[in-house]
Image (cartoon, grey):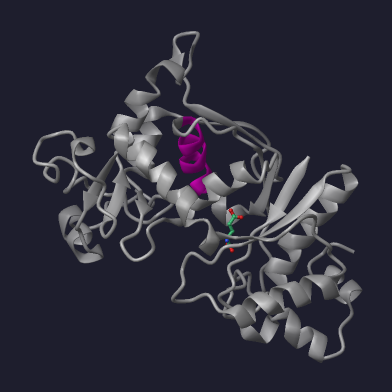
Amino acid sequence: MRTRFAPSPTGPLHLGHAYSAIVAHDMARAMGGEFLLRIEDIDQTRARPEWERLIFDDLTWLGLSWDGPVMRQSERMQAYRSALDRLWSADLLYPCTCTRRDIAEALGAPQEGTPPGPDGPVYPGTCRDVHCGGMPCSMRPRPADQHLRLDIGAAAGHLGHRIDRSGGRTFGLPFLETGPAHQGEVFTSREDYLTRIGDVVLARRDMGTSYHLSVVVDDAALGITHVTRGEDLFDATPIHVLLQRLLDLPTPVYHHHRLVRDEQGKRLAKRDDARAIRTYRDDGATPADIRRMVGLA
Ligand code: GLU
């Protein structure tokens, strides 16, 4: 068993991060497994070395030790490029020049009762058919300076034979969830992929990768068997499972834990500096106090 904590060094760790790190760490120790640390710093405009140092310092203070070397995503660009090349060669990606505004205009007024997908509004597909001039995109070199979207319809077709049919019902791609809110096998149907997720961006113009692509490539590279993370990422998981299938990577078990909220029930945001672990430390709190505050004592 191997799990990880994967913070972005874009601000101080707060109680929500501490909870996430403790849950993953304690689960690994209880199962005789390993707890790894990965620094998710693909957004180089927001990541800072001083935040990274504070992450190491806060985790150590909390009494959490991690196994093996720390993985840093900014050093993994070659692995992301290889994964994108593979998807590009299979004609599963296309370049997109739409701005947020273009997308909003193409979608018109938000449809009532249709919640946005894990990455916001479901992309209307404007660039899908026009960009490679009707030719397979793979006949051209992959552009490095444009958004690249996953053609989710083509991806579902590519996996067609592996989207199981059982008793006349079509099931989608499954993953095993052990978190408190959705225990058991979770299936996402082809229809859900098309209508609720859509053509997500896998490489951002300014980064050359994306959260979804990097997390999938890196969890596999680290041999993660159990992904422990916040419930806010539950809806992104079908995207990760699909990418694992497309890239022939194993699907780990997922454990989406509850989120730490303030007295008003509002989720603690990263820039909620008043609740930084550092601030509690400066005020004389102990690691045991932090465990109590997040409901783990
Ligand atoms: N880096 C992400 C965050 O800080 C977590 C990613 C994950 O655990 O998959 O929210």
* Residue situated in front as seen by the camera: 14 or 83: 83
Asked whether, in this view, residue 3 is left or right of residue 64, the answer is left
Q: Quadrant of the C terminus?
A: bottom right
Range of residues picked out in magenta: 234-245
Location of residue 174 (image quadrant): top right
Residue 248: x %, y % from top left: 51, 30
Vertical side of 15 occupied by 137: above or below:
above
Residue 287: x %, y % from top left: 87, 74
Residue 184: x %, y % from top left: 67, 32
Residue 252: x %, y % from top left: 64, 37
* Residue situated in front as seen by the camera: 217 or 268: 217
Residue that appears at 19% across and 41% down: 140
Asked whether, in this view, residue 284 is left or right of residue 122, the answer is right
Q: Quadrant of the N terminus?
A: top right
Asked whether, in this view, residue 209 is left or right of residue 122, the answer is right
Location of residue 177 (image quadrant): top right
Q: Is residue 288 magenta?
A: no
Asked whether, in this view, residue 85 is left or right of residue 258, the answer is left
Residue that appears at 74% across and 61% down: 21
Q: Is residue 243 magenta?
A: yes
* Residue placed furthest toward the top: 167
Residue 270 showing in the rendered view: yes
Residue that appears at 63% across and 69% down: 265
